[in-house]
Image (cartoon, helix red, strand yellow):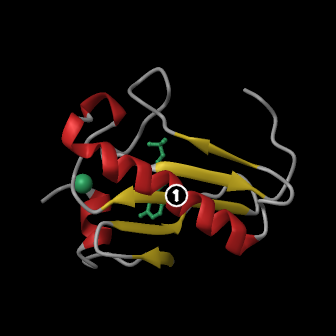
């Protein structure tokens, strides 16, 4: 298996995990762009939002609810935060395993 995020799920490579349940894992981004920069991913391998299927609709909702929960734990619900999916080349997606960026802890420029 080549996917780096699948290897984080299987604990083949280490990550700074902040949340885990049976379907989702969240960990610190290795190159943070803000004081809070976490990646929230499904444990199953889905390459991107462009590959979502109807059967994934509960999972994707849980991904957002997990983001909300972690944002509250980190305190950025008070100051604001950004949730981002990069999809494909023009958006700069570099890891082909669906991941939701949770970014906050400072004022964020818009593009
Ligand atoms: P994207 O550009 O949306 O595909 O985001 C991929 C993100 O994954 C980047 O922000 C990377 O810094 C991050 N990343 C890549 N490898 C790792 C890793 N092993 N552990 C944590 N974050 C990673
Ligand atoms: Zn994967």
Name the residue at 81% across, 59% down: 105
- Residue at the left extreme? 1
Tell me where residue 58 appears, x and y as whole percent: 32, 50
Q: Please, what secondary structure does the residue beneath circle 1 have?
A: helix
Q: In which quarter of the image is the N terminus?
A: bottom left
Tell me where residue 103 appears, x and y as whole percent: 68, 52
Residue 88 versus residue 54 in the image, above or below: above
| Residue toward you, 108 or 90 | 108
Name the residue at 81% across, 35% down: 109
Q: Quadrant of the C terminus?
A: top right
Q: Is 62 on the left or on the right of 35, as rendered?
A: left
Identify the residue under disc 1: 65
Name the residue at 32% across, 70% down: 8
| Residue toward you, 48 or 5 | 48
Tell me where residue 35 appears, x and y as whole percent: 76, 63
Name the residue at 42% across, 49% down: 61
Disc 1 CB within 8 Å of nearest ligand 1 atom: no
């Amino acid at each position: 298996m080549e996917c780096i995020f699948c290897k984080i799920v299987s604990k083949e490579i280490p990550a700074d995990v902040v949340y885990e349940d049976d379907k989702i894992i969240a960990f610190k981004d290795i190159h943070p762009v803000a004081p809070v920069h976490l990646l929230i991913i499904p444990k199953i391998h889905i390459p991107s939002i462009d590959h979502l299927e109807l059967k994934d609709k509960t999972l994707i909702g849980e991904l957002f609810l997990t983001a909300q929960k972690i944002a509250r734990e980190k305190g950025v619900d008070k100051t604001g935060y950004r949730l981002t999916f990069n999809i494909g080349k023009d958006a700069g997606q570099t890891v082909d395993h669906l991941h939701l960026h949770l970014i906050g802890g400072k004022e964020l420029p818009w593009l």
